[in-house]
Amino acid sequence: MIAKPITDFGDRPVPVASVEARSSASGTPDDRASGRQRDMKLFAAAYPQAMVVRYSVRPARAEDAEAMSVIYNEGIADRATLETEPRTPAERRSWLAARDARHPVVVVESDGVVVGWASLNIFNARDAYRHVADISVYVARNSRGRGAGTMLLQRLVELGRELGFHKLVLAGFPTNAASVALYGRLGFREVGVYREQGLLDGRWVDVLLMERLL
Ligand SMILES: CC(C)(COP(=O)(O)OP(=O)(O)OC[C@H]1O[C@@H](n2cnc3c(N)ncnc32)[C@H](O)[C@@H]1OP(=O)(O)O)[C@@H](O)C(=O)NCCC(=O)NCCS
């Protein structure tokens, strides 16, 4: 495939080669995500002058708490979650410190700046549910739509397998197009919709449950 200049895809600029790869995607979700990264490398090689975002994912540290709280608060303000309580750096630091080894938090960096975070969370404390992890993924507003969420979710899938989980699950909004697309691309299936599950800003909202067996 020949890489072409950046075009517009919805409200976010992406390389044409990458758009074409997505629309004709086949293979496993992991293959498709790797294919996207290959496309981005091809594009970078063909257009070195274009802005190419490089990400790296690593375990979260206490000093990431401030960036994580800012990113989480953007998601809360954007009503991407039923959570409505804004977070502080101190609260995120305590939250990080309380994590156990089976429930890690990772951040994604671009040029040394944290632009997103994700976590494996306890789904249910009952022992029979120990092989199921709930997940969270949040990307900074000004970094969305450039692959950071994909990098984070791929890492959660890897970590889930390494840690012996059998399944990842999440609860999101069916109206959150970016999250439904992100999870769908990475092989999550829609389990069902709780109708009018939450009361947000005085309105009932539906909640979409999704899962991926590992
Ligand atoms: C949802 C979220 C994590 C996605 O992360 P992201 O970095 O923006 O996503 P990516 O750039 O990796 O794109 C992943 C897929 O989502 C889709 N997507 C991204 N932005 C989109 C948008 N604005 N509209 C529709 N689809 C979109 C694309 O199909 C893309 O797949 P592709 O490889 O086929 O292009 C991010 O938008 C976010 O943090 N939103 C606010 C918080 C939130 O909603 N968290 C999830 C709660 S369940």
Image (spheres, rainbow, N blue to C red):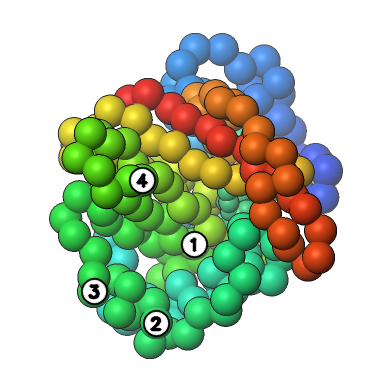
Disc nearer the start of the sequence (1/3): 3
Name the element at disc 4.
Answer: loop
| Tag 1 near tag 2, CB within 8 Å | no
Residue at coordinates 42% horizontally, 47% vertically from top-left?
135
Q: Is residue 97 left or right of residue 68?
A: left
Crowdedness near tag 3: few (<14), some (14–19) or many (≥20) residues, C-alpha within 10 Å: few
Q: Determine which residue is flagged by label 2.
A: 91
Classify mark 1 as within 8 Å of ligand 1 or not, answering yes or no. yes
Q: Determine which residue is flagged by label 4.
A: 123
Q: Residue 187 location in percent, x, y?
A: 50, 25
Disc nearer the start of the sequence (1/4): 1
Please identify the quarter of the rendering in which residue 76 is found: bottom right
Disc nearer the start of the sequence (3/4): 3
Residue at coordinates 67% horizontally, 54% vertically from top-left?
198
Q: Determine which residue is flagged by label 3.
A: 97
Spatial separation of the CA atoms under disc 2 and disc 4 = 21 Å
Spatial separation of the CA atoms under disc 3 and disc 4 = 19 Å
Which of these two is toward me, 131 or 50?
131
| Amino acid residing under circle 4 | Phe
**126 in relation to 110, above or below:** above
Please identify the quarter of the rendering in which residue 46 is found: top right
Nearest to viewer (mark 3 / mark 4): 4
Disc nearer the start of the sequence (2/4): 2
Name the element at disc 2.
Answer: helix
Name the quarter where the N terminus is drawn.
Answer: top right
Q: Is residue 50 left or right of residue 92?
A: right
| Amino acid residing under circle 3 | Ala
Q: Residue 210 location in percent, x, y?
A: 53, 33
| Amino acid residing under circle 2 | Glu
